[in-house]
Amino acid sequence: MIRHGYAIGAAFALSVTPSAAPSALAFAAAEANDEVGACNTLFTCEQERAENFVAEMMAAGIIVPVPKDPGGGYTHEQHKRNYKAMYLAGQLYRITGETRYRDYLRDMLLAYADLYPTLGEHPARSNQYSGRLFWQVLNDAVWMVHAIQAYEQVRGELNAADRQKIDDQLFRKAAYFLSVESQATFDRIHNHATWATAGVGMTGYVLGDKDLIQRALLGSAKDGKTGFLRQTELLFSPDGYYSEGPYYQRYAMMPFMLFAEAIDRNEPGRKIFKHRGGILLKALRTTIDLTYDGYFLPFNDAIKEKSLDTEELYHGVAIAYAQTGDPSLLSIAKAQGKTILTPSGKAVSDALAAGKAKAFPFASRLLRDGPDGDQGAVAILREGSGPKHSALIVKNASQGMGHGHFDKLNWQFYDNGQEVITDYGAARFLNIEAKQGGRYLPENESWAKQSVAHNVLVVDGKSHFDGALKTAEKHAPQQLFYQGEKGTQISSAKIDSAYPGVSMVRTMAMLQIPGLEYPVVLDVLQVRGDNTHQYDLPLHYQGHIMQIGFETRSHIAARPVLGAGSGYQHIWVDAQAIPKEGQAFVTWKLNDRFYTWRMAEAGGTEILLGESGANDPDFNLRREPMIMPGAADKRTASLSQCSNHMECSTMPPN
Amino acid sequence: MIRHGYAIGAAFALSVTPSAAPSALAFAAAEANDEVGACNTLFTCEQERAENFVAEMMAAGIIVPVPKDPGGGYTHEQHKRNYKAMYLAGQLYRITGETRYRDYLRDMLLAYADLYPTLGEHPARSNQYSGRLFWQVLNDAVWMVHAIQAYEQVRGELNAADRQKIDDQLFRKAAYFLSVESQATFDRIHNHATWATAGVGMTGYVLGDKDLIQRALLGSAKDGKTGFLRQTELLFSPDGYYSEGPYYQRYAMMPFMLFAEAIDRNEPGRKIFKHRGGILLKALRTTIDLTYDGYFLPFNDAIKEKSLDTEELYHGVAIAYAQTGDPSLLSIAKAQGKTILTPSGKAVSDALAAGKAKAFPFASRLLRDGPDGDQGAVAILREGSGPKHSALIVKNASQGMGHGHFDKLNWQFYDNGQEVITDYGAARFLNIEAKQGGRYLPENESWAKQSVAHNVLVVDGKSHFDGALKTAEKHAPQQLFYQGEKGTQISSAKIDSAYPGVSMVRTMAMLQIPGLEYPVVLDVLQVRGDNTHQYDLPLHYQGHIMQIGFETRSHIAARPVLGAGSGYQHIWVDAQAIPKEGQAFVTWKLNDRFYTWRMAEAGGTEILLGESGANDPDFNLRREPMIMPGAADKRTASLSQCSNHMECSTMPPN
């Protein structure tokens, strides 16, 4: 075409292909595609969904593959689908009496009974806690909790040969694997052990095997130093707070409630729901308290998308309602729009249909941590009501075991239905095989757990306890003061062990100021050090910067990385400045609201504006903005004493 | 406390204060706070909202401040509140006959009649198009369109003195300002002129002033070369596409429809709604077609939050329904949940209450651009239905005047209710005073309009037409082919004027492939150049990277800026790589779905992974990821011929 010069032809052929991602919870993903028709109660809709799902599974035939894949992979997900199908088929058989459900369930259990004895360690195991059917023993326990509930519905109607085969080749072998071969897990005081003891104990009730029941309740040594009962005593604080944090509390509640319900049914004399002052029912309510707008507070290792609308809580809410008749639980079930197919679920559904629901009384609460309530606390301060209320969360809790973060005296702020002052949660893409099989990513250690990834004081560029878990587990903050009355809500706590020779007292308040439409959050942090130190006080937020009160030095030619370790290597630096008097503020916008962060005078303090995501070649991190007062160059002792006063900033009228 | 070393005390007192942000549309912000009670039709709810708003305004008294502030500032917003209050009070008076509405309106108009003659150029003007009441003449025209509709309801009942004062001191002076003193605006073929002619023309009808009517309809020279009628002929294509793009089409439809409705009422013989084959009603429907899930396609200068649920469209939908009785418009009104207080709005409300609504038939469409339909086109290809359908948008349109972007043969892709392959829209924070008074930001020129900020071919690191508006307005792409049949949808277009000596043909297809759950988008770009050139083909997307098919070279120590101009200065470079054969793909996740971009073999092409937001010291830009094949070092002629084939990539089964 072109006569002069020479022609370069280039053609791009690009394609963009959507494909369905696995949901964080396989159940939800499967059910989301099940349109339900003419049902009109929670229970009948649930039944219709279950019938659709089981019909699909039955049509596909019994598929029990040899285990091969890690989380998110084919065999992993197929075994999950199978235990869901078995569980639901069992409930449907109980409800409808249709023998096809019983026969399907029997055939699948027999297939598992053929497979199970042939299995050794899982080929995709990543540590010593390998499962048989799944890459980690935890999933095997979850499988068992579901399968045994299914088996319970049909065992009495099987012929002796089938029953014996399923009893001996499947459930006894699986119980032996969980409680003997995996004793290290079984005897922990930990949610993995809760799943394992629940599976083994429920199997004991179904098979009439007292040995299994005893091991489950009292630990493998049957001395009560471990096992389910001890877990209820050590894993929850007197206020029903679970030491690992809300995300794992949600997860742990399911085996706690399911096994407790089985204990109550089989051994009502144990009064398990009254054990330790009714701790399990208290913990269930606390689980609900640990949410904002339905989403769990994401501190410690947590997937931020997790909400009350989750399988584990359908069980928990239904069982707790059946025990208590508390009408405020019905409003939670209503928001979930789901329940379970057991008699407890039927009770919830009937009560909801009868209009008995009352609003759940979300309120300010101090949740003490530790079995004796003396290992710090989580303060939840709520102002206003409804899904857009303001909530100040202060985390003065203990480390929370291996899923804990190094974030002593951390805080978050919610408002207008959004997380405004944020917690990163975990660096993990649950069930996504391309992201290391859905496991915790290396950046969970190098960023998400580090102090600088939180809204906490960081001293000398190192994380609290220098990031050492064993040290961290020995110390907890001390809650000094708490006041949850609307208008003037305050939490104050202290810790002097996060850094040698450094003591910090942090007082957080949420105040209603006459003439201001929204509450003000006040953060007074008092630090005493035995020597000169580098102090940084990162603040992580969500929103787009609208106004900066000071002139900044921006990094134009290239964007530098802040540091080399303790999470600093993951921070890009956008700009730095030492604000003049009265200028230390930043205003950002999130949805239809402005938020102004303002720092009282601290002559010479440098403020850094940055973003997470540096040193992340695999794009494993979300990129989120932060503000960090400190001393960005040398960061030594540049923070001067400043007065304990508050200033409020509002934008000009619009 | 500490005995050894010296103590450093540091205390931070930080406060975080939320404050209400002005909504993009002041009306919506005000009304959002108006809870409505026992109303049960669109019209009665609207009336209740209006009564609440006007009652608040009446309680505050007549406040007509001397103009001072730019957009978002106090006097700006007060004059907006005033015209809204006047408009609504006029309608309420017509509906209820309550004289307090008439008197309030009269008093406010008299206050304006006192103020108006005293005004000169607005103190916050930023260019030659200054208004009197507002910083730009456009807002004065909008004020007039509202105020005259209010005056129409009460003029006949005022005493002669008041009427004369308001006629002469306010409306005639304002009409003189708009049509004579601001003649340059008035006689443009542009939406600002549509507002001005509507205000002046409607004033002509109310005052019985034929001169004003003639000027409005035929332009200030009354020769029909400009003016409202000519605007309907030149601003819309034969398919009802407005050359500035969807965002301004939405805005322009309001004065077009309002004035047309007034013309039809006062001079039915003109058959204005049949003028040029019913272009205005056609354009109203096309406005609705230019949305995905209710949101306007954001190409050219556009605020991305803008949806069908917007004041301008309440008017347009109601007037169009009154003209046509088309029941599919009712479903739009239903989705809006709002209507207007005129007889047209009443007709919509009554028809909706009678259950007459039908779904709006969103379908694939080719919208030709240009008054004669020969200046390129916008292809809207839709696959599936409902709010989560897939839509491929190909913009082969003309420049679209000053709000146009340099993005020839650009495309976007929507799926699952989300914008997946994105268009940045405008760099502007509407009505936010801290962001340059809500005006377009400098980054709108330096980034948002530049070619590299779009999904288009960029040659030699320069924008199309080297970013020169006048040159760009002379050329448009040529639509070569269009097929909108489901399953195999195709658009092909060509332009050879964007760069001297470079011709490009881009064929975009959305294909349903048997065995794949979702459609595949195919992009075949054929380029012929007369010499060696640097070719870059940016792709802007939304989501988090899950998998990269190739080894990358990541920038660890610092994040470099890509270039020095034409938008390249705003790109941070995360990583670069020259993929091996078969590896040129990137998979990301957006909500619960994966998307894989895959490039056919192009030996030696370097792929760059980057993000917007460099060289942005005022944090005016959003930070959004991009993929850019090209030659990142020298970028000269490294793109080789590649075959026109498609590969599909899906994630492993979950």
Image (cartoon, coloured by chain):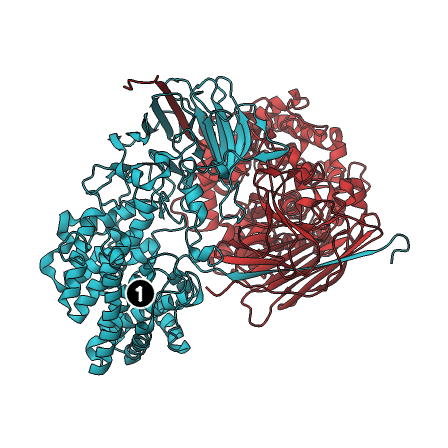
Chain colours: A cyan, B red
- Measured as percent of width and height from the top left, residue B634 is found at 74, 45
The quadrant the N terminus of chain A occupies is bottom right
State which chain disc 1 sits on.
A
Judge from the rendering whether residue A52 lies leftward or rightward of residue B420; answer left or right. Answer: left
Instruction: Locate residue A26: give its quadrant.
Output: bottom left
Q: Position of residue B354 (x, y in %)?
A: 47, 59
- Camera-nearest residue between B322 and A522: A522
The number of numbered discs placed on residues in the rendered structure image is: 1
The answer to whether one can see residue B195 in this image is: no
Q: Depth check: A22 or A357 in front?
A: A22
Residue B390 appears in which quarter of the rendering? bottom right
Please name whichever residue, B368 or A168, is drawn nearer the observer in this view of the structure: A168
**Residue B70 x, y percent position in the rendering:** 60, 27
Q: Residue at x 13, y 55 (%)?
A: A223
Residue occupying the point 61% across, 25% down: B113
Q: Is residue B480 left or right of residue B440?
A: right
Residue labelled with disc 1: A143
Residue B1 visible in the displayed image: yes
Where does the image place residue B177, in percent across and percent down from the top left? 71, 29
| Left/right of residue A402 with respect to residue B548 in the rendered view | left
Badge 1 amino acid:
Trp
**Outermost residue, right direction?**
A3
Depicted B531 relative to depicted A49: above or below: above
Residue at 46% across / 40% down in the picture?
A: B32
